Image: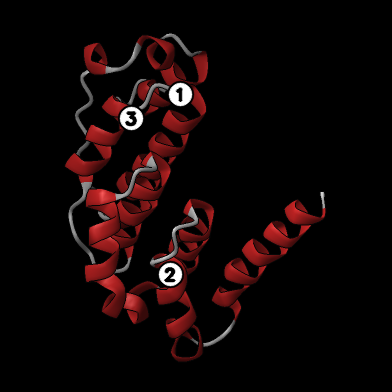
Amino acid sequence: MVKNIKKINKYIKIANLQLIPFKDAKTKLKKHLLSKDSTARYWALISSTSFGSKATSLSDLIKNIMLTDVDIVNKMRAAEFLAIAAKKDTSKNLIQLLYQSKKPKEALLILNSIVLQKDFYQKYTFTINQSKLHTNVKNNMLIQERLKYLQNQI
């Protein structure tokens, strides 16, 4: 239990980096983006995104995460950073991650990122072929609601 408390405190500290100026957070963000700890990378990606265009110097490192990370949600958060902070079109990357996902909760996170980008940031068109979705994902009611929203049916 003490081990978990230490990990949680570590992740809180990474998340709290977004509360300080980017110039003061940059070195620590880089360290956590390169971490072997998948959850540390996840929170470093979220914190990096919060800095918006101020954090574009991290773009190459984060693009590498989008392309090579073993964790789908880290790839998704990296794509989100690149779209929001660096103004890159990562719509195809997000759709491919959605097709790879076998877990409804993970797919919902990806769909939420797609909606965020579609509605508020890049206004990209996201064409999702439902036949490419994993059965566990496709049959989930919340997934179906998100897809209807994206198809302007809600």
Residue under the image location 32 percent in, 49 percent down: 69
Residue under the image location 17 percent in, 40 percent down: 92
Q: Amino acid at mark 2?
A: Ser
Q: Secondary structure at mark 1?
A: loop
Residue under the image location 51 percent in, 20 percent down: 142
Residue 58: which disc? Answer: none
Mark 2 crowd level (few <14, some 14–19, many ≥20, 10 Å Cα): many
Q: Position of residue 128 (x, y in %)?
A: 23, 25
Cα distance in 3D space between marks 2 and 3: 27 Å
Residue under the image location 43 percent in, 12 percent down: 136
Q: Quadrant of residue 133?
A: top left
- Number of marks present in the image shown: 3
Front residue of 93/72: it is 72
Residue 65 in sight: yes
Cα distance in 3D space between marks 3 and 1: 19 Å
Cα distance in 3D space between marks 2 and 1: 25 Å
Front residue of 51/62: it is 62
Q: Residue furthest right?
A: 1
Residue pointed to by mark 2: 48
146, above or below 74, in the image: above
Q: Secondary structure at mark 2?
A: helix
Indicate left or right for 115 with 64 as reference: right
Please name which of the two marks, 2 or 3, marks the residue nearer to the observer.
2
Q: Position of residue 86 (x, y in %)?
A: 25, 68
Residue 103: which disc? Answer: 1
Q: Secondary structure at mark 3?
A: helix
Residue 150: which disc? Answer: 3
